[in-house]
Image (tube, grey):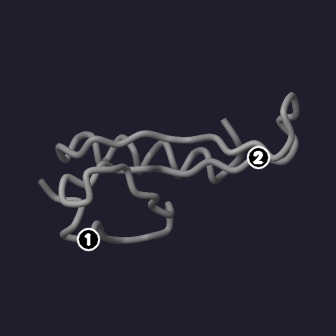
Amino acid sequence: MGGICGDLAMILQEILTVKGYRARTIQLIRQVGSSYDTHVVTEVYSPIQKKFVLLRSEERRVGKECRS
């Protein structure tokens, strides 16, 4: 799934899951049927906002709005 962004997104998802968060990785594809121009991100569920919010893999913290 993707390049380095995919690796970082999956690592972040695993860390969040181990910490008790609901998290998922999403692969963004610019053109259907092409894996050339893609990006992978992580989303974490925010019980306060009652929806998944996007996290960048390079972020170093999870805000209080994502904690249960």
On the image, the x and y values in percent for residue 50 come to: 25, 51
Crowdedness of circle 1 by 10 Å Cα count: few (<14), some, many (20+)?
few
Three-letter code, disc 1: Gly
Q: Residue at x 57, y 45 (%)?
A: 7
Judge by depth and name the residue closer to the eye, 8 or 40. 40
Tag on residue 38? 2
Q: What kind of element bears circle 2?
A: strand
Q: Position of residue 45 (x, y in %)?
A: 30, 49
Q: Residues under labels 2 and 1: Cα distance? A: 27 Å
Residue highlighted by disc 1:
63
Q: Helix or strand or loop: what does disc 1 sit on?
A: loop
For residue 20, above or below residue 57: above
Looking at the image, how many numbered discs can be counted on the residues? 2
Q: Quadrant of the N terminus?
A: top right
Residue type at numbered disc 2? Thr
In percent of width and height, residue 36 lies at 87, 42
Q: Residue at x 31, y 70 (%)?
A: 61
Which x, y percent locates residue 43?
43, 50
Q: Residue furthest front?
A: 50
At 61% from the left and 45% from the top, the residue drawn is 6
| Residue 55 numbered tag | none
User: Quick one: 15 or 66, which is closer to the camera?
Assistant: 66
Residue 12 in the figure: left or right of residue 46? right
Instruction: Classify 10 Å Cα crowding around label 2: few (below 14), some (14-19), many (20 and above).
Output: some
Residue reaching furthest top? 33
Relative horizontal placement of residue 55, taking residue 26 as reference (left or right):
left
Which residue is drawn at the image coordinates 39% and 44% (left, top)?
13
Q: Is residue 55 above or below residue 28?
A: below
Circles 2 and 1 in contact, beta carbons < 8 Å = no
Looking at marks 2 and 1 on the same chain, the residue that comes earlier in the sequence is marked by 2
